[in-house]
Amino acid sequence: MADFVVVIPCRYASVRLPGKPLLAINGQPMIRHVWDRAGESGATEVVVATDDERIAAAAESFGALVCMTGAQHTSGTERIAEVADIMDWPDDRVVVNLQGDEPTMPPRLLDECAGLLGDATADIATLASPVRSQADFESANCVKVIRDDHGHAIYFSRAAIPYARDGGENAARSAALHHHGIYAYRCGVLRQLVAATPSDIEVCEQLEQLRALSLGMTIAVGIPSVRPGAGVDVAEDIARVEAQLAAD
């Protein structure tokens, strides 16, 4: 597998949980746990990307490499693209985007996601697991992806796809996968993405990976060897994450 780096985009102004990267989990800020998971992977370098001095200070206190970015970014992808330019990474450098609210992400999945770019036809790589229930299949909070016979994404949606026309709900659910928000890109692809205007389907679904599909890019979708735990979205998630980390 080719070398890869991990960038952890972090912002302070979360709508549902302000200051999320600094929330204490088992006595350490959440960003420390995310950084640890990245460091346990095969990455050659791990960078915390933020525009907030409080997050930067916390990350530097435990030895993380921090890259300060602008405050104008509307997505982690945009923030990572700025990091690639600041660090002067070449277009063929592979970058894994690990969100700053994923403290239980199994490190091996970072390697697995980056490894999918060994497929020379793939521009981007991501991971998705079987949908666990009909409730998840129907939930707008569970993003679904369907793949072609080569393991490449056909479409991502918050809707229940594919549609079961003749009542074949089980078959429809088994054809879909539950998308996990982890990506690997080559820096050249990353630069193309952020330079492009959001597509109509991206704006409609509020899923930025649809911009890549609109541009004709190929997204390799792998099924992870273990299912990642859910990230931290609300304060009630902290206790669950603490228990999972203790169990691990």
Image: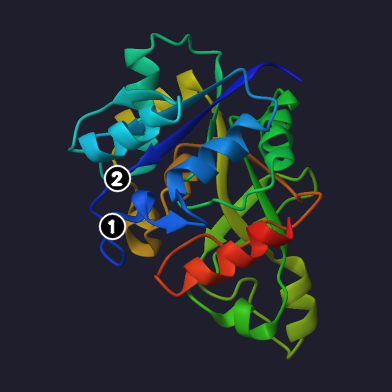
Q: State the residue at coordinates (56%, 40%).
A: 183
* Circle 1 residues within 10 Å: few <14, some 14–19, many ≥20: few
Image quarter (top left, top right, bottom left or bottom right) of the N terminus: top right
x then y, percent, for residue 75: 33, 44
Would you identify the image quadrant in which residue 16 lies? bottom left
Left or right of 13, for residue 111: right
Q: State the residue at coordinates (38%, 33%).
A: 59
Image quarter (top left, top right, bottom left or bottom right) of the C terminus: bottom right
**Disc 1 to disc 2: CB gap under 8 Å:** yes
Spatial CA distance of label 1 from label 2 is: 7 Å
Q: Which residue is mark 1?
A: 14
x then y, percent, for residue 83: 36, 22
Q: Which residue is mark 2?
A: 11
Q: State the residue at coordinates (55%, 58%).
A: 156
x then y, percent, for residue 4: 62, 21
Would you identify the image quadrant in which residue 23 lies? bottom left
Element on which disc 1 rests: loop
